[in-house]
Amino acid sequence: MQEFAKAFYKSKAWQRTRQAYASSVGGLCEECLRRGLYRPGEIVHHRQALTPENILDPAVSLAWSNLELLCRDCHGAAHGSPRRYKVDAFGRITTR
Ligand SMILES: [Zn+2]
Ligand SMILES: [Zn+2]
């Protein structure tokens, strides 16, 4: 977690928001669910990444429309951890 975000992630407002959001989507990873997998979500992710400028703007940092419940794997992928291959629509493994 980045330094500027620490106080935000500890705030009551965020704790309440993430819990309410996670239960609203049934506690499952939304990305896995789109692929027909049922995996528990662990991390409430911000679709629009938080920055020192927008973190205090509740329309960005606390808006449900900007949140997504993800498992660890999907969260890593959402943050662009390097993937060496992907699977295409035909189930073939392709390299990028
Ligand atoms: Zn997932
Ligand atoms: Zn994230």
Image: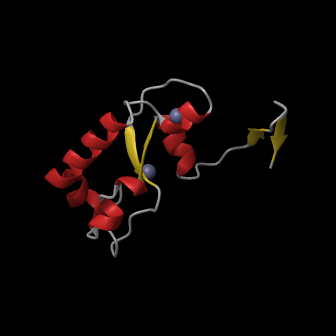
**Which residue does the image show at 57% across and 45% down from the upper left?**
77
Nearest the camera: 44 or 52?
Answer: 44
**Which residue does the image show at 57% across and 25% down from the upper left?**
37
Residue 83 in view, yes or no = yes
Q: Quadrant of residue 25?
A: top left
**Which residue does the image show at 64% across and 48% down from the upper left?**
82
**Number of marks in picture:** 0
Q: Which residue of the protein is positioned furthest toward the top in this rendering?
A: 38
Q: Which residue of the protein is positioned furthest toward the bottom in this rendering?
A: 53
Instruction: Name the side, left or right, on which 1 lies relative to 11.
Output: right
Residue 11 in view, yes or no = no
Q: Where is residue 67 in the image (x, y as percent from the top left)?
A: 40, 51
The answer to whether 55 is drawn above or below residue 71 in the figure is below
Nearest the camera: 48 or 9?
Answer: 48
Q: Which residue of the protein is positioned furthest toward the left in this rendering?
A: 12
Q: In which quarter of the image is the N terminus?
A: bottom left
Q: Where is residue 66 in the image (x, y as percent from the top left)?
A: 41, 57
The answer to whether 5 is drawn above or below residue 26 in the figure is below
Instruction: Name the side, left or right, on which 95 lies relative to 13.
Output: right
Q: Where is residue 76 in the image (x, y as percent from the top left)?
A: 52, 44
Q: Where is residue 22 in the image (x, y as percent from the top left)?
A: 33, 38
The answer to whether 44 is drawn above or below residue 50 in the figure is above
The image's colour scheme reads secondary structure
Q: In which quarter of the image is residue 28?
A: top left
**Which residue does the image show at 51% across and 23% down from the upper left?**
38
